[in-house]
Image: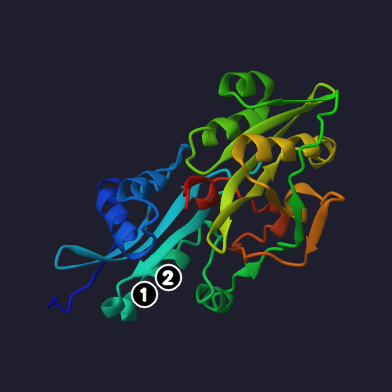
Amino acid sequence: MAHSSKVDLAPITTDDLPRVGEFLGVHLDSSLTPGQWAQALRPTWTTSHPDHGFLLESDGLVVGVYAALYSETGGPDRDRPVCNLAAWCVLEEFRRHSLRLVRAMVAQRDRELTDLSPSGTVVPLNERLGFRHLDTSGALAVNLPLPARRHVRLITGRPDIEATLTGSDLAAYRDHADSAAARHVVAVVNGEPCWVVFRAVRRKGLRLFASVLHVSDRGLFRAAAPAVYRHMLLAHRLPFTLLQTRVSGPGPWHSVPLSAQRPTMYLSRSGQPPESVSYLYSELTQVPW
């Protein structure tokens, strides 16, 4: 197929999302339909940023995409602008233009950058650009159907969750209540709520794992975890849970320690410490691959 030599770089507008979704569905991950891709790139939270990353265009056709999700919170109680790098794909015959997309992303110096699911080839490029690795050590837990403790009860329905959470947790929950990949449960321990966000993930093609993305109170989670694991097993048919120590604290007795999991990276322009990086407001809650 003949193409002109001109390749334009432009922001991805909301009007571009249908064709960007079609491009990603065909060329990056066909497990999601074009409509699912387009919807996933529309954040379920409010943001002041009007665009959704950058695209390459030639002869009126999309030939490359670096999609992003923008937010101004970065997580509960964190008032900072973040650009989360969500999906990067360029047609082979236009690969020489790939770095134009990368440079456009990195040029956004008013925002912290996060890349929470980089592919193996992207990791060394990110390292050269100054991205740092987050600590992903943790554990793999077996979700056992242990009896629930009397002082722990679980809440899963949206009206009940909204009636239980308060303050920044309630605001962040409402931002993610309609996210396609996020699953929510609130464990109430002796009257105190702990909001847990997780997603289902595949390993070696098997959708058997829950991955904990956010825990509002790690101390309460330790007490509530057996009930949460039971819920993941019985309600979501997920027999295992992937935990990261920096997110949820130490793994339970029935877990296998993991020194590292799949890489997650960030580039801070303001010197924010790694513990400030949240998995909320990212493709991990939005994209249900």
Q: Position of residue 68 (x, y in %)?
A: 43, 55
Q: Position of residue 142 (x, y in %)?
A: 75, 50
Instruction: In the rendered view, tell whether residue 116 sits above or below residue 236.
Output: below
Please name the residue that numbered disc 1 is placed on: 98
Please name the residue that numbered disc 2 is placed on: 102
Quadrant where the image shows the N terminus: bottom left
In space, the residues marked 1 and 2 are separated at their CA atoms by 7 Å
Q: Is residue 98 left or right of residue 107?
A: left
Provide the secondary structure element on which disc 1 rests. Answer: helix
Instruction: In the rendered view, tell whether residue 177 sits above or below residue 142.
Output: above
Q: Residue at x 18, y 75 (%)?
A: 6
Q: Is residue 181 left or right of residue 167?
A: left
Which of the numbered marks, if any, corresponds to residue 226?
none
Instruction: Categorize mark 1 by other alpha carbons within 10 Å: few (<14), some (14-19), many (20+).
Output: some
Q: Position of residue 170 (x, y in %)?
A: 62, 28
Q: Residue at x 80, y 61 (%)?
A: 257
Instruction: In the rendered view, tell whether residue 15 sits above or below residue 116.
Output: above
Q: Amino acid at mark 2?
A: Val
Q: Is residue 59 visible?
A: yes
Q: Amino acid at mark 1?
A: Ser
Q: Is residue 131 left or right of residue 151?
A: left
Instruction: In the rendered view, tell whether residue 264 sits above or below residue 252.
Output: below
Q: Nearer the viewer, residue 136 or 230?
A: 230
Provide the secondary structure element on which disc 2 rests. Answer: helix
Residues at circles 1 and 2 in contact by the CB criterion of under 8 Å = yes
Q: Residue at x 60, y 39 (%)?
A: 236
Q: Position of residue 93 (x, y in %)?
A: 26, 79
Q: Residue at x 32, y 81 (%)?
A: 96
